[in-house]
Every structure is written in C-alpha cells, then in structure tokens.
C-alpha cells in the first residue's frame, strides 16, 4: 500500500491559516445569501449551501453547507467547464439545476462563478439555493407524482451562462419570469445567489493578492492531501468488515403500493485504506419523483459515512478519494435514466440512504454508528400557495419549515430536537411562527413536542414535533411528500424505533379526516391541517439508560412517568406538580433486574 504524503514544502501553520480563511469566505457567501434572498425557504429556513471548488473541479471546502447540497459541488463545476470549454472566461456566471449532469434536483438553483487569477481558472465559487417555485406543473418543487421530468414541468438549466463580462444575460431572466409563479420573489433570490458567488470571487482574488498565487496553489495541493491522510487514518481505526443494511421508503398509493426496498453494502478495507459502498442491488427507476440523482446518491452515502467516523476529517475531494461508491445505471439509487423524475432526490430516498449507511456502522459493535434519524417532510414542511387577501389577492408560494423530524441517538448522545432531516444534518433553521404568519395568510394554532414518541434507548432519539395551521385565505394549496408514515426510524444496538409521522385535516365544522403521506390538498378558509413528524431511533437498550436522564426527560415533559417505568424500567416517586419527583433507586434496581432481554 502507498501512503499519501504531503510535499516537502508543506507548511502546517500556513495550511491551517488558509483553510480557515477559505471557510471564512464561504461563511461570508452564506451570510450574503441568507440576508439578501427573498424566499422564506432561503432566508428563514436556510435551505441553501455555499462551497468553493478548485479550477480542476475538486471540492476544496464547504464550511457549514448541507451535505446533500455540497458533496456534489465539484460535479456541477465539472459540467460548467466541460460545457463552456475554451469560452469559459472571467466575468461569467452559470446557472445549473440539471439532475442529470451533477445537480441534486431541479428545485436547487446553483450559481457557479469561475474565478481567474492572472488569467488562470483557479477556483469556482458555488452558491446553491432551494427555490420556492421553479415553474413546475404544481406549485411545489417536490413533484412526488410526476411520472417523468416532463410532468415536473420545470425549466432545466444544464450550466447555462447567465452573466458574461459581469453583465446579465436577460434572455434567461425573461424565460424564468414567464414561467415562475412569483417572478419578483424568484428574481430577488436569483440576484442573491449571484451576489453570494460574486462575493466569493472577490474575496478569493483578495486572498491571492495577499499571499501570492504560488502559495495558494501549494495550499490547495496540501489541503487535499492532508484531508486524504485524515480519512486514511480514520479508516485504519475500523475493522476489515463488510456491513450490509436495509431499509424502505414508504408506499405511495398505486404508484408504489409496497414502498421502495433499499439496500447498501459497506466494505471497509483498513489495510488499503478504502471504503467501498455498493448501491447496485436496489430497484430500478420508479415512475414517480423519488429517483435519486447521482449527486444525491453519492452525497447521502458520504453523509452516512462522515456521521460515523472522526468528525474532524475535512469534507473535500481529498477525503472523498478514499470512498468508492458503486451505482447501477437505471437504479432508483443514483442511476436515473432520462426522463425519470428526480424531483425528490434531495430528501426521501436520500434520507433513507443516510440512515441505512450510518446505522450499518453500529453492526461493528457497541460504540459505533448511529440509530436512524426521523424522515419525512410533512405538514410542517409543506409548500403553501394561493392568493393573499391582505395584499389584494397577490400570489404567494413558499415552503414552510415549521417543524423538524427527530434526530437519531448515537453511542454517546441523545438525538437533536432541531435535527430537521438526515440529509440536512441539523444545519437548517426552523421557521419563525410570527414571520410565517406575516408572510403568508395562515394562522399557526400550535407547535409542540409530543411526549412518549422518542425512540427509547440507552441514548434516546429526539421526540416528534407536531404543528397545526389554519388557512386564512379563500383557497390555499398545501402540498407535502412525507416519508416515515409507514416505516419508522429504526433503533440500533437494542434501541427502539421512533414514532411514525401522521397527518389529519380539520374541517371548519370541526370534523377530522386522516390524510395520506403524500398530499396535494386545497384548503378553504378556516380549515386546518395538523401533522406530527417522525421521531428518531434510540441507541442501546432502554433499560441501560441513566435513571437521571429518564428523570430529566419526564420533568421536561418528553416522557411520561408510565413510559419511564414500562420502557426504561425506571420507577419514580413524588410528582411533577408537587416539585418532588425523584428516582426510586431501589424499585428501579428491581425492575431492571427482572429484564431478561
């Protein structure tokens, strides 16, 4: 085996300084997009990511970008350079949302700016943002029922030049304005994305002017090799083993009556320093929007691996070089054959694959891997649209992010309540109720955590979150593509599964109707939807949980005293109301001594 080494001119201090400077530039790009965008999905939920690639189309750095977004940035940069060829020049900016040539899904508009230093294409800045509307046949960027890309209806831009010599190509702008339901809102987001990428260009030029191009080029080479070394060291701590894990996406009516069975095989070779992940034993493309793009398949696998190893390994093409992912053309997992729809590529199957990969590491033994995190974008993450009577019936379209799914337990910690989704890794924000009510004609009736829903374990998953909101306009369309209503997030190492998601419609007269997992619904004024999102799975047996932690959960209202006794084998004495609730240690010991499994 050949161990990668850095060059003789490696300067660890300068490498650390410049790595942090690059991350600082990405954070400034991020702040620019967050503050300048107009859609709530961007400026409130932070459903966007920024990164920097090298001129050779390798991912250099991503700071706090969402895994599902940034792990494929270099694929999009490569498409830009291949399509533009010799015409690539300073002052260009490209728009890319094609899931067949490196993007995640059509709803993510990516802005790419080639950065030239002394005439050499040295970097590409990347700003990717999930749009509120892209002109789909329905007012959503998640077209679960679309049989193919044509039924989605979105405009597709495979790395199309939108600025030349720093001047806008107005033809593209006119095309989007003519198709998108909220053109002014979209154009604000469009300018914010370009501005973010241009800020990165400006700061990289300043960085090169300060340190000189030779120093910066040496840094890029060293940083990639350092990342590869760190990944190699992390793999060497693992046993030589092949881990196989399975899962399933929920059914979807007659299109997917049995759901989508999923499988991943993870082969760890510490001697050679590689992890091979085989996704080829998965179903063919499906005739709806759940097919993964290649970028999403690779990103979801890498997210599951990075969740399970040394957290300090840099996330870039250097560390990626030690992960080999095998995809079958024509498979639902990363092998879409045109025109198969990839509308939900960033979420549903990808969330399941993050879970499957990270949970597979728990098979190594206690202390490894994680449980599965809650999945599914339900009522709290619906796309709402209609006409706002407060603004004379003006059109509104936006995706809500009022609730989160519960995070998975690990071998050392409970799941995050603010987890969101496996593909986002807790990096998105949750909407402000007050701002959502200001922006849209809705009234949020409640937002709460649901007791006794967390996947129990030595460390427990995060509990479910529930929301309800009422339409305050004559007609409001509500669309969501929720997974996790049939198959819950699994526990690991004896931990219990989390709770499934569920939804209901409350009519204006109070009548309650259950709703399916995939919803295209029209609400009349005064009608309400309520939804409970899925919770995370637990890690380790519940009877091994520290009784003090169980007491804390009961005091917080996350667990009931009855569940503490029945599931965690923890007896409590006193009451919450009296302020004297405490653990009955003697009775707890007797309960736990009686546990045989």
Image (cartoon, rainbow, N blue to C red):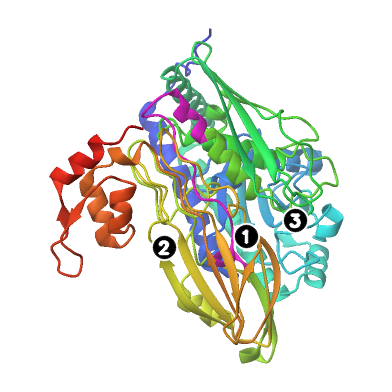
Closest to the camera, between mark 2 and mark 1, is 2
Residue nearest the observer in this picture, 540 or 237: 540
Q: Which residue is drawn at 70% across and 61% down?
A: 141
For disc 1, the marked residue is: 193
Quadrant of the image containing the C terminus = top left
For disc 2, the marked residue is: 450
Q: Is mark 3 on a helix, strand or loop?
A: loop
Q: What crowding class fits label 2: few (fewer than 14 Cα within 10 Å), some (14-19), or many (20 or more)?
A: some
Q: x, y percentage for residue 582?
A: 15, 55
Q: Can residue 19 be seen in this view?
A: yes
For disc 3, the marked residue is: 253
Q: x, y percentage for residue 54?
A: 61, 36
- Pick whichever of labels 3 and 1 is earlier in the sequence: 1
Q: Is residue 430 visible?
A: no
Q: Which residue is drawn at 47% across and 26% down?
A: 363
Q: What crowding class fits label 1: few (fewer than 14 Cα within 10 Å), some (14-19), or many (20 or more)?
A: many
- Pick whichever of labels 2 and 1 is earlier in the sequence: 1
Marks 3 and 2, how far apart in space?
Answer: 28 Å
Residue nearest the observer in this picture, 428 or 171: 428
**Magenta stretch encompasses residue 468:** no
Q: Is residue 332 left or right of residue 304?
A: right
Residue nearest the observer in this picture, 294 or 70: 294
Magenta stretch: give its range: 358-382
């Amino acid at each position: 085996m050949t161990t990668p080494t850095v060059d003789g001119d490696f300067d660890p201090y300068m490498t650390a300084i410049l790595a942090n400077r690059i991350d600082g530039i990405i954070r400034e790009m991020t702040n620019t997009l967050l503050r300048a965008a107009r859609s709530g999905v961007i400026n409130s939920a932070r459903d966007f990511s920024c990164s920097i690639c090298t001129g050779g189309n390798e991912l250099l750095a991503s700071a706090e970008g969402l895994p599902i977004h940034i792990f494929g940035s270099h694929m999009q940069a490569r498409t830009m350079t291949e399509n533009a060829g010799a015409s690539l020049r300073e002052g260009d900016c490209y728009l890319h949302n094609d899931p067949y040539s490196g993007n995640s899904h059509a709803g993510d508009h990516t802005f790419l700016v080639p950065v030239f230093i002394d005439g050499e294409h040295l970097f590409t800045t990347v700003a990717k943002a999930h749009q509120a509307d892209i002109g789909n046949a329905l007012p959503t960027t998640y077209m679960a029922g679309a049989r193919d890309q044509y039924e989605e209806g979105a405009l597709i831009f495979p790395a199309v030049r939108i600025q030349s010599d720093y001047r806008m190509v107005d033809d593209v702008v006119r095309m989007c304005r003519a198709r998108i339901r909220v053109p002014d809102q979209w154009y604000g987001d469009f300018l914010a994305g370009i501005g973010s990428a241009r800020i990165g260009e400006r700061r990289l030029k300043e960085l090169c002017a300060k340190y000189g191009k030779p120093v910066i080029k040496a840094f890029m080479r060293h940083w990639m090799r350092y990342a590869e070394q760190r990944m190699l060291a992390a793999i060497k701590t693992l046993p030589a083993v092949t881990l196989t894990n399975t899962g399933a996406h929920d059914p979807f009516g007659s299109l997917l009556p049995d759901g989508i069975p999923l499988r991943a095989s993870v082969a760890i070779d510490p001697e050679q320093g590689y992890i091979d992940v085989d996704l080829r034993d998965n179903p063919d493309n499906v005739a709806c929007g759940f097919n993964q793009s290649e970028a999403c398949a690779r990103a979801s696998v890498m997210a599951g691996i990075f969740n399970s190893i040394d957290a300090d390994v840099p996330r870039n093409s250097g560390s990626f070089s030690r992960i080999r992912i095998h995809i079958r053309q024509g498979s639902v997992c990363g092998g879409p054959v045109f025109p198969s729809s990839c509308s939900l590529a960033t979420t549903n199957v990808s969330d399941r694959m993050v879970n499957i990969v990270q949970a597979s590491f728990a098979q190594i033994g206690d202390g490894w891997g994680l449980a599965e995190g809650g999945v599914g974008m339900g009522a709290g993450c619906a796309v709402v649209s209609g006409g706002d009577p407060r603004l004379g019936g003006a059109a509104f379209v936006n995706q809500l992010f009022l609730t989160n799914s519960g995070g998975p337990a690990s071998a050392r910690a409970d799941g995050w309540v603010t987890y969101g989704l496996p593909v986002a890794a807790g990096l998105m924000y949750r909407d402000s109720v007050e701002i959502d009510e200001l922006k849209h004609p809705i009234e949020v009736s409640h937002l709460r955590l649901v007791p006794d829903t967390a996947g129990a374990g030595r460390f427990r998953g995060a509990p479910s979150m529930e929301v309800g909101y009422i339409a305050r306009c004559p007609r409001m369309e509500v669309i969501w593509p929720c997974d996790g209503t049939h198959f819950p997030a699994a526990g690991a190492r004896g931990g219990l599964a989390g709770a499934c998601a569920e939804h209901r419609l409350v009519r204006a007269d109070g009548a309650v109707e259950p709703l399916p997992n995939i919803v295209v619904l029209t609400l009349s004024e005064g009608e309400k939807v309520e939804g409970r999102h899925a919770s995370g799975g637990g890690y380790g047996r519940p009877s091994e949980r520290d009784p003090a932690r169980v007491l804390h959960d009961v005091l917080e209202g996350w667990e009931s005293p009855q569940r503490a006794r029945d599931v965690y084998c923890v007896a409590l004495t006193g009451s919450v109301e009296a302020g004297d609730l405490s653990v009955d240690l003697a009775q707890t010991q007797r309960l736990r001594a009686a546990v045989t499994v």
